[in-house]
Amino acid sequence: MKSRVTIVLGLQWGDEGKGKILDVMASEADWVLRAQGGNNAGHTVEIGGEKFVLHLVPSGILRAKVSCLIAGGAVVDPAGLVKEIEGLAKRKIRTQGRLFLAEQAHLVLPQHRAVDQGSEKKRGLAKIGTTGRGIGPAYSDKATRVGLRAGELALPAAELARRLRERVAAHNRAASSQGWEKISATKTVREIEKAARFLRPYLADGVTLAHRAVAGGKRILIEGAQGTFLDVDHGTYPFVTSSHCTAGGACTGTGVPPTAIQRVVGVLKAYTTRVGGGPFVTEDGTLGHLLHGMGREFGSTTGRARRCGWFDAVLVRRAVQLNGVTEMAITNLDGLDGLEKIPVCVGYRFEGKILHEPPVESSDWARCRPVYRVFEGWCEPTTEARHWKELPRRARIYLAAISQMVGATIGIISVGAGREQTFRHG
Ligand code: GDP
Ligand code: IMO
Ligand code: MG
């Protein structure tokens, strides 16, 4: 049977509008699998003016017929997930029998949050600007093979408590010398046991579930979190998250093999944003001021104002290569509606040369200066457009040029946060 798996991921530094695009695409899907990351993510979906922000639960949950899996590549804060599920229940979104938590997923424990926050404090001005959710330390324990996995939530209470106490003791032994806050073992056991009782019915072997869906010819969306340049291998290291946000991570995170992938939809903004530290060649304070003034570009997880800048074609071209993007979904076109001139970065000026590929070192990347090609703005609203031909001529010129520069076709265009403000190109 022909496989029908689509990866949907971010091509910039996260917050590209993946939640919105996934929600739209989920109208024609059976499954949404969240591949990686944790509750550092915040995926916003707006339906009829009502706003949902999803952190761990796949965006497909808002479509009643879609089943959802938090796959093994994700890291799960048990109490955080319970809170999210309860929040959905209050808003009449049913999760029982249609949301599954992979036993393979690693747990984020209170001590991981303490290490994350303590390490950031120690870094001072050189801090990464993490979300403080314990994501890096949880992935670090996974890599050093001392992590606990979601499947262990089903252990008899005494055994789960023993394993938790052992982890907390190791943390507390290291805490003083490292400057981390010590953690109470009793509180940890209480918090995790309570969440375990709630989450047990959701547990499943994520790989078997995913493969059944693939073999059954189900329409599957793999939901990426964060974005290409936050990927621990391919991002602006060390200003990255600790998981693989690129297409390869979608495969390892879910256990769905590369040969089963049919499409890769890269989501990107018509401009660029990033939250936290790290290089950002096209950052522009005036654009940031303008977008923040419109009430836009505040983080959905931490509420921090996002840094804003112009579209960076050097960056997105690399993202298209890394992910094997088969089509792009461009969001937030309407953010540029009022501008008379719109610069696009077509190269980086660095040590007397013009680069067309980003440098390897973040410190070099930070020293690059943008080479801009300036487009005429369209200076009229795009928010009512529902067809390519309804876009202003200059907006079409802008989009076509971007597509040509980065080497990928545009499949979807988004001109507002609402479901209906989306249309296919061609
Ligand atoms: P994600 O993490 O990639 O899912 O993105 P976020 O939800 O963190 O941030 C994207 C923000 O842009 C959210 O507030 C969305 O509601 C909003 N959004 C998505 N697409 C559009 C669009 O085309 N226009 C406008 N105005 N807002 C959009
Ligand atoms: P979604 O899925 C934007 C950023 C943080 C920080 C860096 C490391 O909503 O696009 P972490 O807490 O992961 O160790 O922080 O990564 N970051 C995100 N930025 N969107 C996200 O997720 C992000 N998740 C993490 O701001 O710079
Ligand atoms: Mg987000």
Image: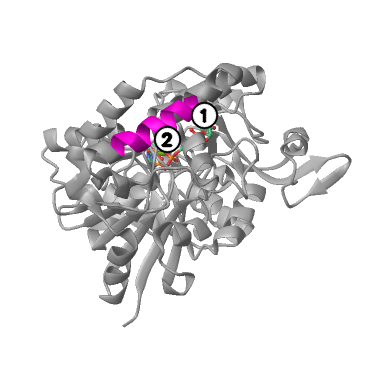
Q: Which residues are magenta?
A: 160-171
State the residue position of label 2: 40
Q: Is residue 379 visible?
A: no
Q: Is residue 161 magenta?
A: yes
Instruction: Note whether ligand 2 is within 8 Å of mark 1.
Output: yes
State the residue lying farthest toward the right.
352
Residue 401 falls in image quadrant: bottom right
Residue visible at 62% across and 31% down in the picture? 283
Residue visible at 74% across and 46% down in the picture? 360
Residue 205 vertical placement versus 195 (above, below): below
Circle 2 crowding by C-alpha within 10 Å: few under 14, some 14–19, many from 20? many
Residue visible at 67% across and 49% down in the picture? 314
Q: Amino acid at mark 1?
A: Thr
- The one nearer the camera, 336 or 178, is 178
Circle 1 crowding by C-alpha within 10 Å: few under 14, some 14–19, many from 20? many
Q: Amino acid at mark 2?
A: Asn
Task: Please state, as top left, top right, bottom left or bottom right, where the C terminus lies in the image.
Answer: bottom left
Instruction: Note whether ligand 2 is within 8 Å of mark 2.
Output: yes
C-alpha gap between disc 2 and disc 1 = 8 Å
Mark nearer the N terminus (2 vs 1): 2
State the residue position of label 1: 130
**Relative image position of residue 392 (x, y in whole percent):** 44, 48
